[in-house]
């Protein structure tokens, strides 16, 4: 099996961190060409630091980490420290990473890599706002047809919104970038709140990760203990939703997920519903399908995969 070449575009975030760890623990399936950071859950200075920290926790300091956009394409940045803590990775004992940040801008890296690699051989995996991808597609439209697939965490339909009544955070932060991506014609798979809210970090699932008795296991369990408190209080659920690792798990074990190929559009004008993903789940329009919109997953299989892969690090 040939490992699938990917670029992880991310704003770590505890759940982003688990996604990165899962990818780095799966070299047979996934070849991480680089990690591009974007402002989102926390400002860019924290997301690029957090990404390098996670690579060091995984003992993968050779991973290339790039800093991309520090703001959305057209709007002021909205962040989510109220969920992730001031650092974005609150929970474990944090440290200053020693591995270097690459000097190249993350958006330039995306463009250069898609031009250099064979067409249709690189998958983009955005885990945060789509600002980097949106700028890359605007500046270099020739790369759009070279993308194999975009697998992203973002949006919602039945679950509606988590940052406003109508919008999911990643799409809300940069709806113009999301609009560019969804209209690009690139094959897209979306992991909306409808599926990620079924991936709950219950106490037994966190305990299984802590029982790995490793640096990665302890670091991850400490992150998840902190991360879940916000959503448990908000939703009254038995755990916090582990959003972003759904993207990486889908690459490794797509049979864990199910969804529909439908039309999805983003609201960019309304003050009331800005960032809403209008998903034609029931096929009531004649708008052409542009995304595989995931709606369900095997949660036990998902956490079993994460725990077994983290044990490799």
Image (cartoon, helix red, strand yellow):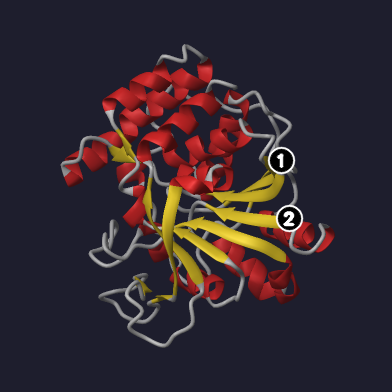
Circle 1 residue: 64
97 displayed left or right of 147 = left
**Residue 88 visible in the displayed image:** no
Residue, x 18% and y 40% (percent of image)? 233
Between 87 and 190, the one lying in front of the other is: 190
Q: Quadrant of residue 32?
A: top right
Label 1 environment density (alpha carbons within 10 Å; few <14, some 14–19, many ≥20)? some
Q: Residue furthest top?
A: 213
Image vertical order of residue 64 relative to residue 222, above or below: below
Image vertical order of residue 142 relative to residue 78, above or below: below
Image vertical order of residue 90 relative to residue 126, above or below: above
Q: Where is residue 154 in the image (x, y as percent from the top left)?
A: 43, 59
Instruction: Tell me which numbered mark, 2 or 1, is placed earlier along the sequence.
Output: 1
**Residue 289 visible in the displayed image:** yes
Secondary structure at numbered mark 2: helix
| The C terminus lies in quadrant | top right
Q: Is mark 2 in CB contact (under 8 Å) with mark 1? A: yes
Kindly identify which numbered label has been placed on residue 109. Answer: 2
Residue, x 66% and y 40% (percent of image)? 29
Between 210 and 121, the one lying in front of the other is: 121
Q: In which quarter of the image is residue 121?
A: bottom right
């Amino acid at each position: 099996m040939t490992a699938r070449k990917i670029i992880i575009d991310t704003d770590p975030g505890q759940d982003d961190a688990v996604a990165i760890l899962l990818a780095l623990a799966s070299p047979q399936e996934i070849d991480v060409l680089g990690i591009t950071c974007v402002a989102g859950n926390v400002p860019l200075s924290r997301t690029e630091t957090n990404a390098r920290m996670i690579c060091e926790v995984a003992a993968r300091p050779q991973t290339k980490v790039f800093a991309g956009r520090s703001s959305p394409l057209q709007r002021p940045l909205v962040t989510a420290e109220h969920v992730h803590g001031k650092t974005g990775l609150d929970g474990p004992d944090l440290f200053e990473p020693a591995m270097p940040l690459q000097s190249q801008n993350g958006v330039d890296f995306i463009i250069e890599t898609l031009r250099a690699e064979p067409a249709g051989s690189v998958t983009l995996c955005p885990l945060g706002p789509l600002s980097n991808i949106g700028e890359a597609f605007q500046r270099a439209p020739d790369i759009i047809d070279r993308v194999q697939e975009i697998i992203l965490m973002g949006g919602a339909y039945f679950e509606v919104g988590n940052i406003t009544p109508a919008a999911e955070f990643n799409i809300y932060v940069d709806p113009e970038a999301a609009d560019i991506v969804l209209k690009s014609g690139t094959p897209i798979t979306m992991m909306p709140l409808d599926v990620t809210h079924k991936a709950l970090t219950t106490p037994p699932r966190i305990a299984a990760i802590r029982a790995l008795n490793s640096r990665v296991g302890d670091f991850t369990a400490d992150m998840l203990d902190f991360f879940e408190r916000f959503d448990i209080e908000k939703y009254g659920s038995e755990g916090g939703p582990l959003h972003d690792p759904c993207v990486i798990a889908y690459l490794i074990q797509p049979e864990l997920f199910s969804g529909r190929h439908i039309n999805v559009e983003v609201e960019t004008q309304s003050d009331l519903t800005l960032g809403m993903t209008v998903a034609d789940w029931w096929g009531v329009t004649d708008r052409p399908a542009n995304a595989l919109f995931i709606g369900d997953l095997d949660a036990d299989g998902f956490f079993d995969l994460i725990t077994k892969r983290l044990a490799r690090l």
